[in-house]
Image (cartoon, rainbow, N blue to C red):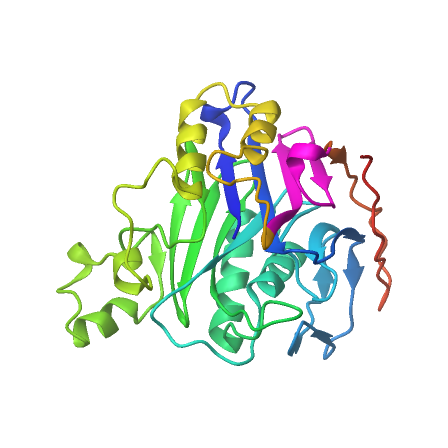
Amino acid sequence: MCDTFVALPDATLDGSVIFGKNSDRPEGEIQDVVTFPSQTFSQGQHVQCTYIQVPQAEHTYAVILSKPRWMWGAEIGANECGVVIGNEAVWTTEPYQSTGLLGMDLVRLGLERGETAFAALQIIIDLLEQYGQGGNCAEHFSFTYHNSFLIADRKEAWVLETAGKYWVAERVIQGTRSISNNLSIRSAGDLHHPNVIRDVIAQGRCRGEADFDFAKLFSDGGVEDPLSPYSREGRVRSLCQMHQGKFTVETAKSILRDHQGGVCMHGQFETRGSQISQLTAQQNEHWLIDRPFPCQQEYQRVELPGMVRRENHSSNVSLPTKG
């Protein structure tokens, strides 16, 4: 239950890239803002993610993460290279694995290892294909889902949507783009799983790439077409489009504090963390909230940690937010 958006340079007032996400999690769950410096590791090391281990990269980038305290992965974040990523829960017709990498693990791995948005996209896809996605996504009750991702840097953005082992990716090079808790890519995208079209043709579900519609084929419960302006997804998309050419950080704040579609969520699920990033060629700035309800809080600027490179060292510091 989240919403993520990006406005690329032609859509913003000053030519920057502006990214935002609200992280909606179970009521009462603690979500921290933490930072980790860049690090180097020896060959053969592994990193323990939420449920499984994967081989550690030789080098990881410094990151800011907004993450549920109980899990290894993160809902949102940014790295020293100016890459930002947020993920969304989606429900699909494909089976759910009992264990694997959480979507939040993939967010963190993409940020720690990806120098650009496209590199982070490829890293997430490779890890998804090697280890699969799976495992319980809530601390105190059973809650499983597949994932979509919005990955951006100062030049472009990518939407990656998954259904079990299958995936499709769409490049965003202009305007605004948002994702919510539904599959939204209505084609084979710009990149896709090597076997997905072949498999759905073999199952008699489509005739070929021309009529391949990832969202329609894999959404559990079908797709809403057109989107209701009263849904969260429809509300965020319309607010983004309404500000084309004049989008600012203040626009991002107003969207993430919006209640008309439940974007700022209150209830059994609530907005527990929020991030806004502004990316330019000169600098990248990140503002986060680490407590519930952006409508009641001020965003605080968070700096990336110093680029400390030492084996097996990390920092995990919760950054307080002024009320």
Q: Position of residue 244 (x, y in %)?
A: 43, 23
Q: Nearer the viewer, residue 152 or 203?
A: 203
Residue lying furthest front = 267
Q: Nearer the viewer, residue 56 or 17?
A: 17
Tell me if residue 282 is in the magenta stretch. Answer: yes
Answer left or right for 170 relative to 111.
Answer: left
Q: What's the residue at 59%, 44% (across, down)?
A: 22
Q: Position of residue 84 (x, y in %)?
A: 60, 45
Tell me if residue 190 is in the magenta stretch. Answer: no
Q: What's the residue at 26%, 63% (across, down)?
A: 217
Q: Taking 170 as reference, is 208 above or below it?
A: below
Answer left or right for 251 relative to 166.
Answer: right
The residue segment tinted magenta is: 270-297
Q: Taking 306 as reference, is 258 above or below it?
A: above
Q: How many marks?
A: 0
* Res 298 → quadrant: top right
Q: Nearer the viewer, residue 179 or 6?
A: 179
* Res 245 → quadrant: top left
Q: What's the residue at 51%, 45% (across, down)?
A: 3
* Res 87 → quadrant: bottom right
Q: Position of residue 141 (x, y in %)?
A: 60, 72
Instruction: Report the quarter where the C terminus lies.
Output: top right
Q: Taking 174 as reference, is 30 above or below it?
A: below
Q: Nearer the viewer, residue 178 or 270?
A: 270
Q: Position of residue 214 (x, y in %)?
A: 29, 58
